[in-house]
Image (cartoon, rainbow, N blue to C red):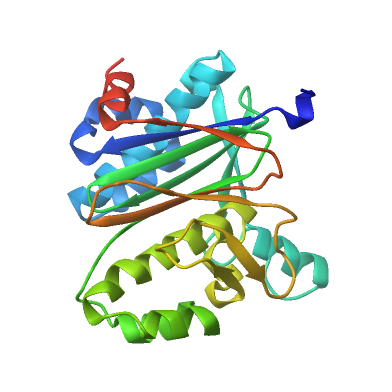
Amino acid sequence: MTLSSAPLDTTVWWAHTSAASERLLRLLDRSERERQSRFRLQADRDRHLLGRALSRLVLADRAGCAPEEVTFDLRCRSCEEKSRTGAEGGRSGPEGPHGKPVPSGAARGWEISVSHSGEWVALALAREAPVGVDVERISEARDLAGLAGYSLADDEQRAWNALPEKDRAGAFFGYWARKEALLKATGLGLSGGLRRVAVSRPDTEARLLSWEGGGGPGAAWLSDLDRGPEYRSALAVLTDREVALTVHPPERTADLLRR
């Protein structure tokens, strides 16, 4: 087996919001602490803190450095494309620097993605292959029909409409998690357009079926992640190689956060 054909090691870490602790604030840089202070709700503060602290601890372990040596560049692919074509906007955008965090400094070469919803935070990690992870808490209270019209491609919409009413919420968030994982992996995020991305039905094996317009990946590995019946989650890795996935449960993550 050649190096290029060897399985690509990819890791997902799950953290429960109960693992958040103020002592983790030491792992955040100044801009992250400033953002932390702007969240009004404790739940939002806990999720942000866990995502940033866990990212530094895991990357420091993989790179063999101190967490303080792990830095990030923010890359917004949509803004980069606007700048390249001369459209309005730029990498900073109206709200300041933003985009997908790309490890730099001692952790350069690693790729990460962070997502959170409800009581859960997920971190995905791979080496030199873009990753995207998404977790969504199933909600019955939203205008699902309106959201489906905004986010599902035509074939997806028809399949979703044919489902029994009781199955639609779970299926919708299954579609959404797969699509957002892919969009996050590309660096486009939701601005890339959910309807442009078509994936397999949530009750079948996760696959990318089509991508309208530019910006799509040359190859993509896609899988659902299990986070219990109240959530839907998915992982995307932009590679044509086999993926060897390791998932660390919240107990293992809590041990890491307590170090």
How many numbered marks have been drawn onto this rendered protein structure? 0
| Quarter residue 83 falls in | bottom right
Work out whether 250 lies above or below 240: above
In front: 191, or 23? 191
- Which residue is drawn at the image coordinates 47% and 21% (left, top)? 67
In front: 159, or 217? 159
Q: Is residue 231 among the parts visible in the rendering?
A: yes
- Expressed as whole percent of the image width and height from the top left, the position of residue 105 reads 64, 26
- Which residue is drawn at the image coordinates 77% and 23% (left, top)? 1
Q: Is residue 28 among the parts visible in the rendering?
A: no
In front: 37, or 105? 105
Work out whether 165 lies above or below 68: below
Q: Left of 137 or right of it: where is 217?
A: right
- Expressed as whole percent of the image width and height from the top left, the position of residue 144 reads 31, 80
- Expressed as whole percent of the image width and height from the top left, the position of residue 146 reads 36, 86
Q: Quadrant of the C terminus?
A: top left
| Quarter residue 137 falls in | bottom left
In front: 219, or 193? 219
Q: Left of 197 or right of it: where is 52?
A: left
| Quarter residue 257 falls in | top left
- Expressed as whole percent of the image width and height from the top left, the position of residue 70 reads 54, 26
- Which residue is drawn at the image coordinates 37% and 84% (left, top)? 162
- Which residue is drawn at the image coordinates 43% and 39% (left, top)? 123
